[in-house]
Amino acid sequence: MSSSETGPAEGAVAAVAPQLRELRRRAALTLEAAARAAGLSPAHLSRLETGQRQPSLPMLLSLARVYGTTVAELLGESAADRDAVVRAADMEPTAAGGWTYWRAGAPGCGMQALRVQVPYGSQGDVVRVHPGEEWLHVLRGRLRLRLGDTEHRLTAGDSAHFDSMTPHRIAAQDPDGVELLFVHTLLQSPTAALCLGPTPGETP
């Protein structure tokens, strides 16, 4: 992509690179240790930290867990900015891994709330497995959701709530894509208690 084609969303993701490196150093993790914990290769994480690769939303969630923080902080937002109300006019789009998403919840919390636009053919073959829970609600379009060996077809108004350790795939069924509300809990994050309360005995 040429510089003339880079919009605000791509610029926002590019700004994540130095933040990723700083948070890894703050966590006292080597590149190899952080990459292993996030399920990435050291070379891939290095490219993310230098801005040579765009992180996908699942990668951001995984790295946030490893560093004990939130996607909001990875995007440069501080807990001091947290407000109970998020206005539509204040939701800035961010592009990552083919998806476009808008923060729909307060930053600095262990529960991440996002509005997500998933285009047709984007990451439909990527299987995800990670600690936590996910809840999604279809706002527009049709969604193919595979949980383990079972495939579900969801339309506008349908929801799904599942353990993120269940292997799952998300794909738009129609060429126009699908728009979702998406909530993910970061159970390994020390900030989780801000929104979720303590989870004694919880096994990530």
Image (cartoon, rainbow, N blue to C red):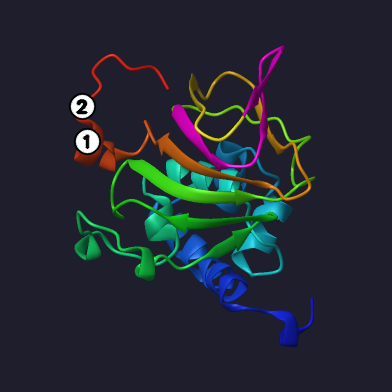
**What residue is disc 2 on?**
198
**What residue is disc 1 on?**
193
Q: Which amino acid does label 1 sit on?
A: Ala
Q: Do the residues labelled 1 and 2 touch (CB within 8 Å)?
A: yes
- Report the side of 101 relative to 25 (left or right): right
Q: What residue type is labelled 2?
A: Pro
- Point out residue 139 in the picture as x, y percentages from the top left corner: 52, 42
Q: Give the range drawn in magenta.
A: 133-154
- Report the side of 33 relative to 111 (left or right): right
Dominant SS type (magenta): strand
Observer-nearest of 24 and 55: 55
Q: Is residue 191 magenta?
A: no
Q: Distance between the residues labelled 1 and 2?
A: 5 Å
For the question of whether residue 67 can be seen, the reply is no
For label 2, the crowd category at 10 Å Cα-Cα, with few meaning under 14, some 14 to 19 and many 20 or more, is: few
Observer-nearest of 62 and 107: 107
Residue reaching furthest to the bottom: 4
Q: How many marks?
A: 2
Which residue appears at 53% of the width and 71% of the height? 12
Question: Counting residues from the N terminus, which is met first, the one under dot 1 or under dot 2?
Answer: 1
